[in-house]
Amino acid sequence: MVFSSIIFLFYFLPCFLLLYFVLPWKNAVLLVGSLVFYAWGEPRFVPLLLLSALLNYGCGQFIARSEGRARKRWLGVGIAANLGLLLYYKYLGFFGGMLNAVLERFHGGLDLPAVVLPLGISFFTFQGISYLIDVYRRDIAVQTSFLNFAMYKAMFPQLVAGPIVRYRQIAHEIEHRTADNARVWLGVRIFLTGLAQKVLIANTVAAPADRLFALPLEELTAPAAWIGIACYSIQILFDFAGYSNMAIGIGHMLGFSYPINFDRPYSARSITEFWRRWHISLSSWFRDYLYIPLGGNRVSPLRTYINLGLVFLLCGLWHGAAWTFIVWGVWHGAWLIIERAFLGAGLARLPGPLAQAWTLLLVMLGWVFFRADTLPHALHYIGAMFGQGAHGDVAHPWQMYFGRSAMTALLVGVLLAVWRGTAAPRAPARWWPPLRAAGLLLCFALCVVSLAAGTYNPFIYFRF
């Protein structure tokens, strides 16, 4: 089940909210509702989700009650168990395939099982690891109620696609939270904004992006390649940011303050700034639980560069078990190193729009690797972008994939994405709240019409 579906909008969410606000057992209702939500798409993996909750709850108890080396030992057990589940379900096929490629040279090989990737495993695994580390550091008190902890692990708003909500960010709200009318209305506004981003922009540009990336490379012209990656760049931003906003909005409706996950990343004027604005919950997770423990930037420049490279290599691998994702992570890590070494000072001296255009170009080139099926596909696509694709009679009439609605969505998406919004906020005029409400209701109606018509409704981050 996805948020941008008729079933969720008109059946699951209203029924859940009714039970949530009527019944006194808020955490139990949220836990049961979250398990139903997860079971709708992946019923066979509900036991795995509960096992992950039990594993992290138990290890957290042992860490809290132990001293000295025992604490570190239980932390190691918990982290190893979390990573073991992630490695098995997400990376067995990738690393096993690499091993088989080596063994085949010696006339050997392994018979690997076909493993299905559970929804959201990357997100709830990182949740568990951060919880155990924070308990170990004594940054938080251990959760003594398994029901409350299982509710935290299974919360459906952020379960399958984030943001990665750390326990300490909502620890107080697990026990004591309120959802008055003002906060519920705030949540509704954020949710509807995210729904419009997802359905009206991301879904509309997704179809031409997929079709243009699927063109045979010998039929792909430079304009078609640029339109394709432009559509995909807008799709992935508003697809993921929209879904994150929907999650944050539902969180407010329930009394939770989930962290912001996107802050106009395409307005960044360096790759360093981009990663302060893109998927903030993930980049801050890597910073706090990997980069800083490795020494961060408090060590020698060479060691700092190695730390950055390792973090973004793992960041790419976190997104998917494929060489394309690894190269995407290395691409970003390399530019972060280059900016720290010398380029950052030069970018700071450039006119802002020029630095922003340079950064967006690097980001879009990186998205080619992220979207392409294989590395050769990515390299040939980039070649087509720079004039090494089709010409003349062999070119595909790609304009048939890029109609008026896609052109409008792309234009609106670009304008919203690149705007930096640097003006100082002013108190809204009296006419603004009703106008905003009317605009959101109109967007909601358009979203419902689009979804009811069965238009293209993918979700990129379900793959991760």
Image (cartoon, grey):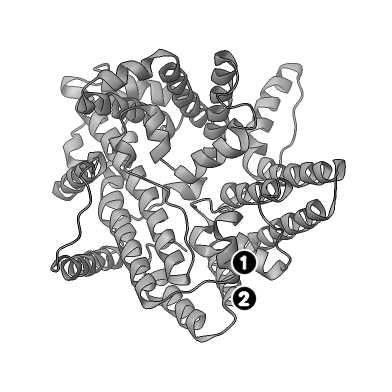
Give the residue number, with chain letter if any, for mark 1.
151
Q: Is residue 172 left or right of residue 245?
A: right
Q: Could you classify mark 2 by the number of other residues whose Cα lies within 10 Å: few (under 14), some (14-19), or many (20 or more)?
A: some
Q: Give the mark count.
A: 2
The residue positioned 20% from the left and 48% from the top of the image is 409
In front here: 431 or 308? Answer: 431
Compared to residue 128, the image places residue 23 above or below, namely: below
Q: Can residue 59 be seen from the camera position used here?
A: yes
Displayed quadrant of residue 214: top left
x and y, in percent, of residue 38 in the image: 56, 64
Residue highlighted by disc 2: 28
Left or right: residue 446 versus residue 95 is left
Return the mark for residue 363: none
Q: Are marks 1 and 2 in contact (CB under 8 Å)?
A: yes
Q: Amino acid at mark 1?
A: Met
Label 2 sits on what residue type?
Ala
Q: Nearer the viewer, residue 261 or 220?
A: 261
Could you tell me how far apart the alpha carbons at marks 1 and 2 are, in whole angstroms?
Answer: 7 Å
| Residue 206 against residue 307 in the figure, above or below | below
Q: What residue is shown at x 28% (from left), y 68% (from top)?
A: 448
Q: Is residue 114 visible?
A: no
Residue 161: image x %, image y %? Answer: 49, 52
> Picture coordinates of residue 266 (x, y %)?
30, 37
- Decide: few, some or many residues near mark 1? Use Cα within 10 Å; few <14, some 14-19, many ≥20: many
Element under label 1?
helix
